[in-house]
Amino acid sequence: MLYDDPVFSCFLIDESGSMSPYKQSVIEGQAAMVESLRASMKCKKGSLFVAQYLFSSTVRALHPFSALQPKGPDKVLVLDDSKYAPSGNTALYKSLYYLLQDMAANLASAAQNQVKASLTIGVITDGEDTEKGIDPAEIKKVISELRGQKFLRKSVVIGLTHSRFTQGMLDELRERLGFDEAISLTQSDPKAVRHAFVLASQSAVSGQGPRP
């Protein structure tokens, strides 16, 4: 029994080789993100469900959608050295398309049970897709459909920018994917990675619900 309309929040976290120098910052930032989500009103109302995926050359689920509890215990995992090992390339498109299919299934199930659920997507990456395999136009189409069905509450891509992944490239990526927002953080700033996770948690519980 839910006290509020549920929000399904999905986070896609870059685990490619270029993230290796920031491994500890990612581990600490992701833990801070989960704690921030636990403190949210949606979580306190028992209506926040979280899924986390890591991606490099392939995508892997850290855990499927799970109800987040204000004080735990629950099935929402935090990263450590054994769970986060950056390597490989950046299969952003394939990974995002995969998790969108997973999300659509959860939303369809909620709709069948006459539950008015909404969805948030947060992507944290430090580079462009290098693997191809999926046309980003397909992702944009799914995003548009979710928005049109009033399922999509918020979609944001948070980019750790540098000389080979500029603000302009991040903005182009947002447009290519059909996301609502792109947030740029300078990779050279030691606090940028942690801040990326803080912004991701804020995006997950902000807003008033799906667009009219």
Image (cartoon, rainbow, N blue to C red):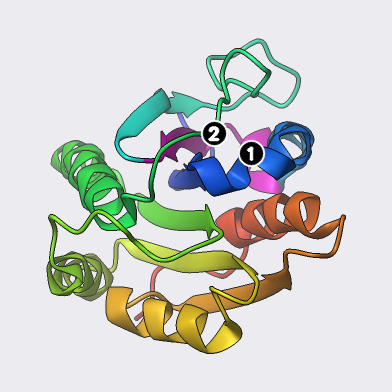
Q: Quadrant of residue 152?
A: bottom left
Q: Disc 2 on helix, strand or loop?
A: loop
Indicate the quadrant containing the N terminus: top left, top right, bottom left or bottom right.
top left
**Magenta extent:** 41-56
Q: Is residue 76 magenta?
A: no
Can you identify the residue that label 1 sits on?
20
Whether tag 2 and tag 1 are in contact, CB under 8 A, the answer is: yes
Q: Which mark is residue 86?
A: 2
The image quadrant of residue 147 is bottom left
| Residue 52 located within the stretch drawn in magenta | yes
Which quarter shows the C terminus?
bottom left
x and y, in percent, of residue 63 in the image: 43, 22
Residue at the far bottom: name it.
Answer: 168
Left or right relative to 144: residue 156: right
Can residue 56 be seen in the rendering of this structure? yes
In this rendering, position of residue 34 left or right of residue 142:
right
Residue drawn at 30 percent across, 52 percent down:
96
Q: Say which of 163 and 8 sits in front.
A: 163
Residue 128 location (% of width, % of height): 41, 66
- Name the kind of residue labelled 1 in the image: Ser
Residue 78, percent from left and from top = 65, 23
Give residue 52's position: percent from left, percent from top: 47, 35
Q: CA distance from mark 2 to mark 1?
A: 5 Å
Q: Label 2 is placed on what type of residue?
A: Pro
When asked about the image quadrant of residue 130, the answer is: bottom left
- Point out the tag, 2 or 1, that comes first from the N-terminus: 1
